[in-house]
Every structure is written in C-alpha cells, then in structure tokens.
Image (cartoon, helix red, strand yellow):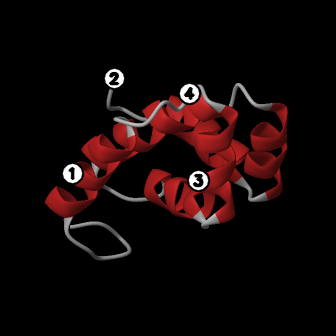
C-alpha cells in the first residue's frame, strides 16, 4: 500500500482514463490544473506504488509542455520529488 493509503488499482485506472484525453490540448491541461489535478498527480509521485508514479509521470510529461503548468508544478513542490525519483532503484 502507499504511504497515503488508497486503492492502487482504482488509481491506475483513473490515470489511464486521464491519458484518453488529448493532453497536448491546452484546455485539457488547464482543466486538470483547475480541478486540483496537479496536486493529486504530484502527491502520487510521493507514494510507494511504482505503477502510480509512472502513470502520474506520464501525464505530467504530457501536460508540462505548457509553461503555465510547468510553473504550477514548481510552485507545488513537484520538482524535488521528480529529482528524487531519478535516484530511485526502480529503473522503470
């Protein structure tokens, strides 16, 4: 289980569903931000569940092409968490 609790399977399904949207489209990127999705995605990076981290990173990778989203990720403290993931023993 993750540090924050929750259902990993449900989280992975939700992340996969998000990837069905056109994440390259600015309206989708801003909608994710506006509903608090960036906070959720960044929190998922700080779990023990590798699948959740990978799913979150894939979405963040797509939506962070937007400069506003990049700034929001930095403001939410996401950058140090991403750097720590690079030191992870999980190579995936």
Label ID, residue 32: 3
Instruction: Indicate the quadrant containing the N terminus: top left, top right, bottom left or bottom right.
Output: bottom left
Q: Residue at x 31, y 24 (%)?
A: 92
Q: Upstream in the sequence, badge 3 or badge 4? A: 3
Q: Is residue 67 left or right of residue 34?
A: right
Measure how far apart labels 1 and 4 are at the Cα level. 18 Å
Residue mark closest to the camera, 2 vs 4: 4
Report the disc number at residue 13.
Answer: 1
Which marked residue is nearer to the observer: mark 3 or mark 4? 3
Disc 3 from disc 4: Cα separation = 12 Å
Q: How far is mark 3 from mark 1, CA to CA?
A: 16 Å
Asked if residue 50 can be seen in this view, the reply is no
Q: Name the residue located 33 percent from the left edge and 23 percent from the top edge.
A: 91
Q: CA distance from mark 2 to mark 4?
A: 20 Å
Within 10 angstroms of label 4, few (less than 14), some, or many (20 or more) residues?
A: some
Q: Residues within 10 Å of mark 2 (few under 14, many from 20)?
A: few
Residue 52 can be seen, yes or no: yes
Per the image, label 1 sits on a secondary structure element best described as helix
As drawn, the label of residue 25 is none
Tell me the distance, in whole angstroms, between the alpha carbons under discs 2 and 1.
22 Å
Residue 46 lies, in percent from the top left, at 48, 57
Sooner in the amino-acid sequence: mark 3 or mark 2: 3
Residue 55: name its quadrant: top left
Q: Which residue is at the far left? A: 9
Looking at the rendered structure, the number of numbered marks drawn on it comes to: 4
Q: Which residue is mark 4?
A: 62
Of label 3 and label 1, which has the lower sequence position?
1
User: Mark 1 and mark 2 in contact (Cβ < 8 Å)?
Assistant: no
Q: Which mark is residue 91?
A: 2
């Amino acid at each position: 289980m993750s540090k924050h609790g929750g259902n990993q399977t449900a989280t992975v399904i939700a992340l996969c569903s998000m990837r069905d949207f056109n994440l390259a489209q600015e309206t989708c990127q801003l909608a994710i931000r506006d509903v608090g999705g960036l906070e959720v995605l960044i929190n998922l990076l700080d779990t023990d569940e590798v699948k959740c981290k990978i799913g979150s990173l894939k979405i963040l990778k797509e939506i962070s092409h937007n400069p506003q989203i990049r700034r929001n990720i930095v403001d939410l403290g996401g950058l140090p968490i991403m750097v720590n993931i690079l030191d992870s023993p999980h190579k995936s």
